[in-house]
Structure formats: structure tokens, C-alpha cells
Amino acid sequence: MKPLGPIPPGYALIDGELAVAGRKASELVATAGETPLFVYSAQHMRRRVAALREAMPARLALHYAVKANPFGPVLQLMDGLVDGFDIASGGELTMIAAAGIATDRVSFAGPGKRDSELEAAITAGVTLNLESEGEADRALAIAERTGATPRLAIRVNPDFDLKGSGMKMGGGAKPFGIDAERVPDLARRIIASGAEWRGLHIFAGSQSLDSDAISETQAETIRLAARLAEASGVPLPHCNLGGGLGIPYFAGDEPVDLAGIGARLSEQFAVLPGVLSETRFCIEMGRYLAGEAGIYLTRIVDRKVSHGETFLVVDGGLHHQLAASGNFGTVVRRNYPVAIATRFDAPVDEEASVVGCLCTPLDRLAEKGGFPRAEVGDLIAVFCAGAYGASASPATFLGHRPAAETLV
């Protein structure tokens, strides 16, 4: 048997079933009226935010990265929990506005922003994290044409990355940000233009479980911010330290040492150079806030045996859970945490693969895992589904429909 990933803490058992917020999986599906279904736990998200607030220095603001999970009710929940929001498209700006979130709490990063997106962001008072000198030129031209005062920051491509990260966002040639040595000239030009100077965004990587590497990257980021502020000759009003904190997906993964990371960052803040004495710092989290708060429920529609192997065929698949299928950046496919939700306390008694309804061999949600015997009609739960699931998967592939979503 191939090991399954670790089920996150905080989920309950009621009458032999997986339960969220005091409601059994079968009840949640009955209320939704359909499977597949994403279920997001508000309690999990509140607890995660509270744990971050307790561990991190009080000076550090917390932003939510909308790309992780832009479901409207999740955004509205986060509105009362975090200090700001980070978006990566004009579409996400529309989602933010639809959720009733004040757009002056929003920053916008990402290469390839269209002129229409730049104009919408400038008009809404969003902070633009500029990804190139060309993008800066376009933003300033739009501001001059519209008579608006743009709020501009620079996204820096640092000369280091986050060791052990699942996705490296800095170091070497990158489509993200402006190479560090070119930042001071652009900062001076932005200030001279009359724009509101908003500082730096430095994001070196994400999905790391190496607490020491995260802390060292934060220290390097602060040192880089100080050098760039000195070279620019102007105070640095704000610095986004990026994210980086990962969650355990696979067997053997261990959670990050949140208290240790917070303690080391507090030590860094205690000895900041003068040029950063008035700087406001933030981190942006998406996966770390929402990932473990979500499960994906899908129903077994067929049970079959082929050449001695058991396959549990479900009505969902990679079109909703691309990452769990192993097709979202992983080199070697490993199993996510997966369970039979309607037999949550039953012992393992067979090896089976959970496969989706798509006509591709890539559509596997669990490969040769150990499960209690499950039958047609049972519900499968894929955990760690609260981030990069519904909105990061090819929902309409082969004509299928998106999964339902609910916040409980």
C-alpha cells in the first residue's frame, strides 16, 4: 500500500462519519443537494488566524492571498479576520468588491496586468505592486490621463529564494518583479512623479515546511529591504515579506514551527536599522489560512476490479482537485490525505485507488491507499482542499460542471 497524507487536526467523528462544524458529511451533501462538494470550515480559519496573531510580533500585519480561495463567503469571513488582501488579477478585484471589501485594503501583484486592470486598480485605490519598468510607465500614463493619484509599490525579484519551497518566486531570472539592483532608480522615479509611494513587495517562495529556511528568508528579506531603502534615499513606508508557510500534504510531512518562526521574526524586528524604523510590515497567507480548512466530498458511483486491483470510481476528480491528482506542480505523485467519509472510523481492510470520472489515466485522487471496504454510494473526502482546489482546477474539462461550495 502507498501511504496517505496526514489528516489535519480538528475534524470530528459523528455516528461513524466525518463531521465538520457538528454536521456529518452525508448531511452536508444532503443540504447542498449534490456531489462533488467543497466544504470550508469557518472555525478552522478563525483558529489559524488566531494562532498566527498569537505567534507573530504585534507589528506584523496579516494579508489574505485571494488566489488561494476566492469563494465569496470565505472572502467575507476573512474581511473580519485579516488586515488586508492581495490579488493577482482584475477578476479578483471584482470578487473583492462583490464581497463588500474596501478596495483601499488591497494590493495587486502579478505579471502581465492589462491596461484595463491597471486603470480599475488605480481608480479603486488599490496598491499596485509593479512587476517591471514598463508596467510602471503604463500605470503612470493611465494616472495622468485619468487625473488619479496612483498608489505604487515595487515587487522585487530578490537574489535569493526560499529553500525547500514548493514554488520558488525569487532568485535568478524570473517573470516576477524587478531585479533588486534596478529597484532604487524606479523608486526615485515613482516618487518624483507625484504618485503615492507604497514600498516593496518581496516574495521569495511558497509552500515550505522548513521553519529555519522560512526564518532565514525573512531575515534576508529585511536586510534587502533596508539596502534598497538606503539606495533609494527615501523612507520605506511598507514592506510585504511574502508568505512561504506551507501545510502538510503528504506522509512524513510535519507542520511548520509557527512559534519558532514568530520568535525569530520578533528578534529581527527588535534590531531593525533606522531606515526601517517606521516601516509597516506584513505577510501574505493563502494556503496556510485556508488549505486545511477545506474538504472535497465526492461520491463513489462504481466499484470495479481490474487485474486484481480495486478501483473506487467517483463522480469528481482532477477537474476539481488538480493538485490532489498530482498534476499541479509535483514531480513525483504522492497521495493527499484521503478517507472514506461515511466510514471514517472503520479499520483499513483493503488496498484501493480512488479514480475520477474523466477519460484520462491522470485522474487519480488516491493511488493504492489503505481504506476500509467502501461501496457505491459512500462518500470520499479529500482533505487540504481549502486552497488551490475549486478555482485552480480545470472545472469544465470534458464538459463537466464546477463543484458546489459551502462555508460552514
Image (cartoon, rainbow, N blue to C red):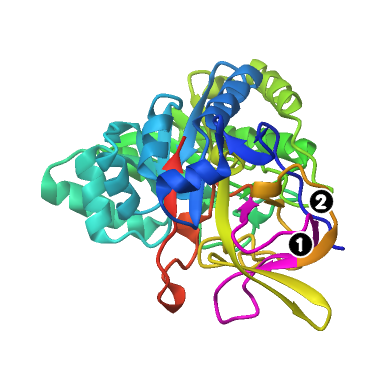
**What residue is pinned by disc 1?**
334
Q: What residue type is labelled 1?
A: Arg
> Could you tell me which residue is drawn at 84 percent across and 53 percent down?
348
Q: Residue 251 carries which label?
A: 2
Residue 376, picture quadrant: bottom right
Badge 1 density bin: few <14, some 14–19, many ≥20, Cα 10 Å: many
Image position of 309 (left or right of 126)? right
Is residue 197 depicted above or below 348 in this figure?
Answer: above
Reply yes or no: does residue 380 show up in magenta: yes
Image position of 364 (left or right of 59)? right
**In terms of depth relative to the viewer, which is nearer, 58 or 48?**
48
Is residue 229 depicted above or below 164 in this figure?
Answer: above
Residue 69, x across and y down, in percent: 46, 47
Q: Badges 1 and 2: C-beta atoms under 8 Å apart?
A: yes
Q: Distance from label 1 to label 2 (Cα)?
A: 8 Å
Q: What residue type is labelled 2?
A: Ala
Residue 147, x across and y down, in percent: 12, 43
Reply yes or no: does residue 158 show up in magenta: no
Sequence-wise, which precedes: disc 1 or disc 2? 2
Mark 1 lies on a secondary structure that is: loop
Badge 2 density bin: few <14, some 14–19, many ≥20, Cα 10 Å: some
Image position of 344 (left or right of 68)? right
What's the magenta region?
353-382
Residue 79, x across and y down, in percent: 38, 29
Residue 406 visible from this viewpoint: yes
